[in-house]
Amino acid sequence: AHPRTFHSCVAKTMWVVADITSPLFGKEFDDERAVQAGVRNGAFCLVSKDGAVLLLKEIDIPREEFIKQSVDKASPQIRTLESIKAPAKKIAPSPTPDPLCRRQSSRAELGHWDMADKRPPLIPHHFIFGVFLALSYVYLVVYSYADRPPTVTTPLLVTFLFPVILWFAMQIMKSRPPVARYVFELLLVFDLYHLVTSIYVFVLVVSEAGKLGMFSSMWDAIGRPPDVLDAFWMPSFVKWLVTFPVLPTWGHRPEVTSLLLRKLFWLHFHNRALELLDTFFRIAQKRFRAYGALHLNMRIVSVWSWYFACTVGGGDIYFLIALDSYVSAVRFLAFTLSLLHWNWNIYIDFGRYAPKLKVFRKESLFHLQVCEFAVLLLHSVAGLWWGTMPWHLMLFQMVVTTMGICVFTDFYISRDAELDGRGVEVLRDGRVVFSFDSSAWLFLYHFGVAMWVEDNVQIPSPTNIAFSGSSGGAVVAVTLASGASNHKVGTYVARDLHAAASRNPFKLLPGCEEALDIFLPADAHHSCTDVCRVLLTKVSWRAPFLLGEVVSRFRSWADLFACVRASCHVPGVGGVLPYPCPGRGWYYDGLVWLSLFVPWRTFGAQDSVIKVSAFGFPGADIRPSVSLPAWWALLPPSSEICEAMMALGYED
């Protein structure tokens, strides 16, 4: 036969997932590297992909035919498994699992990790076009430099015009599918540009600062003699650090500068403004959400900070630029490797069956940025105290670094979150969740809302309705979830508890304990598990020391009681020390954690939430139609007005 005719008779083979119990069953597997590294046995192969082990089979027939043959062959085993399968639980894995929990998914918006689920092929002329744009930008920035402070035009455009352009871009993309062309190549060039320029700025700034003598002793920089150290006792290594003449030091005044330093400051300032453009990539991929918007707001404010630093043009600005360019180089190196789907996590491998020691991973990058903000915050305090840098710049730097620490710190903890082994709390269908805010004595308004829910909302099963609460709102949420009578509990609070604690705030918590003890059913922990979420503030010896913890699974009645009591433990009113929950830790009141930082209101992103706020906080769905005085939270009015407050909640 002719060679071309012979090759046309050979069917194309492919690797497919052959494990019929896997959600990926029947899908084509095209990672040749993983196949080459796997364990082959005839037509089968065991491979490791994203931490999971997959069974593959090499087939030369259409996938649809292979799936049909496999299902027909396994039908007896499938029927046997279904016959002995336990009843489905209330909470089950979603049919489309998400590998990241909600908090991790939100924090992914701080970088580019979630921009490409699968690495697309690199199109050379698209990449060359991106390189041309990057070189054009460098030409405009470098050759438009004039040796004078930058104008306020750039930060003004970033503040007022940039959000308007983003809004129009979001409106355009609202009814369109995610953009596929050019995005991968342009984002790769974007990350590579920032990586190269950050390394360039860091090396030259450190070199030029050394030539200007900025690595001298800190005491020489701020004009204080080292003899002052002898007046205070301190360890010898501390004296060595503050007098060592090679370490980068603070306290240099703006007059210490050079033309090259000012050019580098100019380039770094414009690079930080250019970094905002990654928001367009998110919008084009439809991955721009609330947490990304918060991060964008912080970066717009930071552009003003770098503008003020660039107007100073010397002195300690070298330290700010050097530190930020170093961290930016590490960030964009990680972003580039993630975009290319190259593993950049660093760990120590001790051999077979031994655990791997993780040295640097994604969370380490967040920690690095938090450390950067902490150092810059300390520097701003020192510069303000010594008076070596302009006070307005130091104050603005304090604001920006505090915002950065809040955005990049993970305040969320939930030991109940890993319900399906992947850290994702999901249901087959979303639920309606009534969420009650912190309230103190104003929880009487919440009880009125709960009475209406009790009278008018039929709750067929926990798969339809759920509840969440913080502080006084947790008491109301648990009362609803446990099936206790809100009419009886609310009346008891408005009359009996009011008579004992209305003029003594310190008796409020003992009164709540008594109410829970009386009205909470003996099986309340069963009724509330996976139906009610309680927000607490965990006290830890490790940074950030205060964490928002969400509890939704309760081991016993006492465990439920302790969690609700801890959520109500207002500092000062409940005492100085935090409240102990056996087996969990020490806690304060639920406070007012933003659900953006601590996703406490719902069990999953598919849930619909109805927010109830007695204080009338923005975003609340149910709020008082008549303003309630804030001091009523600690010093309530008369018993009659308290009952009227419940009636108001019922009507609203």
Image: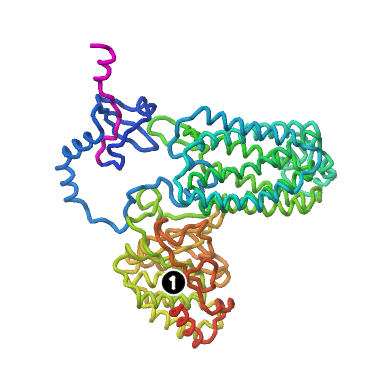
Q: Quadrant of the N terminus?
A: top left
Residue type indicated by callout 1: Val
Determine whether 310 is above or below 66 in the image: below
SS at badge 1: helix
Q: Pinpoint residue 294: horizontal percent, then vertical percent.
A: 57, 53
Q: Pinpoint residue 167: horizontal percent, then vertical percent.
A: 56, 53
> Residue at image x 36%, y 53%?
419
Check disc 1 and report the residue beneath it: 475
Left or right: 342 in relation to 557:
right
Q: Is residue 543 visible?
A: no
Res 414 quadrant in image = bottom left
Res 551 quadrant in image = bottom left
> Residue at image x 27%, y 37%?
26
Q: How many marks?
A: 1
Q: Is residue 595 visible?
A: yes
Q: Alpha-carbon neighbours of circle 1 within 10 Å: few (<14), some, or many (≥20)? A: many
Examine the structure image and report whether residue 363 is included in the region drawn in magenta. Answer: no
> Residue at image x 35%, y 64%?
556
Determine whether 57 is above or below 403 in the image: above
Q: Pinpoint residue 511: horizontal percent, then vertical percent.
A: 47, 78
Near-viewer residue (545 or 227):
545
Left or right: 7 in relation to 473:
left
Q: Pinpoint residue 566: horizontal percent, then vertical percent.
A: 48, 66
- Bounds of the magenta segment: 1-20
Left or right: 240 in relation to 586:
right
> Residue at image x 24%, y 39%?
20
Determine whether 306 is above or below 341 in the image: below
Determine whether 648 is above or below 160 in the image: below
Examine the structure image and report whether residue 4 is included in the region drawn in magenta. Answer: yes
